[in-house]
Image (tube, helix red, strand yellow):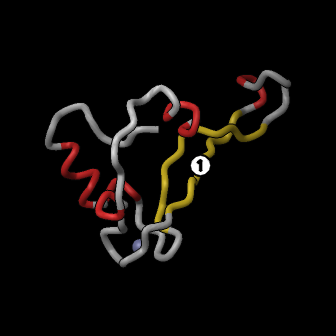
Amino acid sequence: MSEENQENQETVEIGEKDIVTCSNCPGAMFTEVVTFVKVPAVASQTGKAGIAPAGNTFICMNCGTDISETEAIKELRGDGDSGLVL
Ligand SMILES: [Zn+2]
């Protein structure tokens, strides 16, 4: 989803200084992780109990720290509504 969104944005210079790094280690690679919830049979479209994705976030591939802990995200939160753009 994030790759499609970027096509509509203006071209800006994004350099090495703009790379988001982990708050806990020098890592700059993040991976998407998904939270799942259990779905009982009565609430399931298939009529069978199962699990369903309930939300996602990104964590550092090196140490597992959530991306919301990074300085880059904390700076943006100070501006109000801005934050993680996916
Ligand atoms: Zn890390």
Percent across and percent down for residue 44 are 76, 25
Relative vertical location of residue 81 with respect to residue 21 in this rendering, above or below? above
Q: Nearer the viewer, residue 48 or 13?
A: 13
Q: Position of residue 52 (x, y in %)?
A: 68, 38
The image quadrant where one finds ligand 1 is: bottom left
Question: Residue 84: x percent and y percent?
Answer: 37, 42
> Which residue is denoted by mark 1 in the rendering?
34
Image point (31%, 57%), residue name: 18
Which of the 4 image quadrants contains residue 24? Answer: bottom left
Query: Percent position (x, y) of residue 46?
Result: 85, 24
Looking at the image, residue 63 lies above or below residue 50: below
Residue shown at the point (58%, 32%) measured from the top left: 4
Q: Residue at x 22, y 44 (%)?
A: 76
Q: Residues within 10 Å of mark 1 (few under 14, many from 20)?
A: few
Q: Is residue 86 left or right of residue 48?
A: left
Residue type (three-letter) at the residue carrying disc 1: Val
- Give the total of numbered labels: 1
